Image: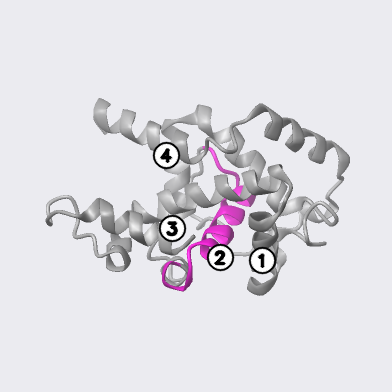
Amino acid sequence: MNGEEVALTSHRVARALSALDRRAFLRLVGAVTAAGSWPLGCRPVTSELGPPPEAVLKQLTPRTYAVFQAAAGRLLGPGPAELIQRGVVNPAQIADAWLARLPELAPPLRAGLLVLEFTPFPLLRKLRPFTALSPAAQDGVLADLMHSSVDWKRTLFKGIKSFACLTFYSAAPSRAITRYPGPFGGRGGAGAIAQAMEEDD
């Protein structure tokens, strides 16, 4: 990446994670972490969601990698979910690579993903870790976040979904969904990507 590309990526990542980068939200994360012992957190991450054996993570942990991968698959709709499940697009790997270049933006995302993974009922609508839930149960947790009257829940949803969209739609294979032909393939690509992201909202 040249200097201009780094600056543009930094701006996009910072904007996507801006909802999570708030002191009030981070204080809440600390309170939730202190209040819960989360004994189920010791269970290993499933191989379907975790990083491949050869992966060397820079900013995400195997746990937060798996949570982001699971959330992205549920948040982006059936077409993107299929590409993620098949390993054609890997949002968590893209996220880790970006955050390795922008490490100051990593803590809010990691904190938010741990809240999504481990926070139990009554704060979140679940009793088990997010990655241990069925797809339908994961959808229920995310829908509760999106429609909640509680500000921190909507903040969590917005931050994770924004970054999931950014990582997925930056990958070349996603062009089959957005109909964006790439940087040298004609005009209108940005509009197609924006439309695809809106359709997933």
* C-alpha span from label 1 to label 2: 7 Å
Residue 138's disc number? 1
Residue 90's disc number? 3
* C-alpha span from label 3 to label 2: 14 Å
Task: Give the image location of residue 32, x and y in percent.
Answer: 80, 40
Q: Which residue is mark 2?
A: 74
Q: Nearer the viewer, residue 191 or 42?
A: 191
* C-alpha span from label 3 to label 4: 13 Å
Task: Give the image location of residue 43, x and y in percent.
Answer: 75, 58
Instruction: Tell which circle, 1 or 2, labels the residue nearer the N-terminal end.
Output: 2
Q: Which residue is mark 4?
A: 98
Q: Amino acid at mark 2?
A: Arg
Q: Looking at the image, is mark 3 or mark 2 nearer the viewer?
A: 2
* C-alpha span from label 4 to label 2: 21 Å
Which element type, helix, strand or loop, lies under badge 4?
helix
Q: Amino acid at mark 4?
A: Trp
* C-alpha span from label 1 to label 4: 26 Å
Q: Which residue is at 74% across, 37% downward?
A: 29
Q: Are marks 3 and 4 in contact (CB under 8 Å)?
A: no
Q: Nearer the viewer, residue 6 or 88?
A: 6
**Mark 1 Cα within 10 Å, few/some/many (few <14, many 20+)?**
many
Which element type, helix, strand or loop, lies under badge 3?
loop
